Amino acid sequence: MKKIKINELIFGITCFIIFICFFGTFFTAVIAIFFGEVPTKTSGIVKYSFSGSLNILFVAIFIAISGFLFIKFFEPIKTLKKKPKTPQYTKCPNCKEVFNYNELTNGKCKNCKDVDTIDLDEYFEKYPEELEEKD
């Protein structure tokens, strides 16, 4: 199961709340415009004038525009990625030697000198046959 990051969760909940608010006010405005009254659970039937119905419609449009702007400007926050971490252990693709990354100079192999070492996870993704040989 995929882990959901907290900023994605907050973004999704906020979008859902905006969605519910928009449709609630929009359908209330449409019913009030066409029928002049809206049935509610708590107050019974609420009567609206035409101008009151239009005011509710304008509120729904304002919520829709606010929701669009929220999604447009805060979606990059949802997709923020952490800085790439320095790997703890790396492996040289030439000599197949494993090193502690902190002991290397600029991530170069101690034996081969000019060869960049690769993070162990990336190395075994790139060369899966070596992982099978170890087993």
Image (cartoon, rainbow, N blue to C red):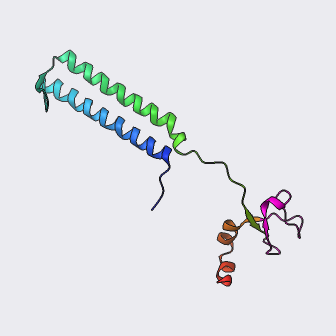
The answer to which quarter of the image holds residue 37 is top left
The answer to which quarter of the image holds residue 120 is bottom right
Is residue 109 shown left or right of residue 12?
right
Say above or below: 12 vs 49. below
Q: Position of residue 58 (x, y in %)?
A: 30, 22
Is residue 105 shown left or right of residue 12?
right
Say above or below: 17 vs 105. above
The residue located at (13%, 23%) in the rendering is 46
The residue located at (30%, 33%) in the rendering is 21
The residue located at (14%, 26%) in the rendering is 34
State the residue in front, 117 or 58.
117
What type of secondary structure mainly makes up the magenta span? Answer: loop
**Range shown magenta:** 93-117
The answer to which quarter of the image holds residue 60 is top left
Is residue 52 shown left or right of residue 36?
right
Quadrant occupied by the C terminus: bottom right
Q: Where is residue 57 in the image (x, y as percent from the top left)?
A: 27, 24
Q: Does the magenta stretch include residue 64?
A: no
Q: Residue lying at the far left in this picture: please name it.
A: 44
State the residue in front, 127 or 121.
121
Q: How many marks?
A: 0
Quadrant occupied by the N terminus: bottom left
Q: Position of residue 73 (x, y in %)?
A: 51, 34
The residue located at (26%, 19%) in the rendering is 55
Q: Position of residue 15 (x, y in %)?
A: 39, 39
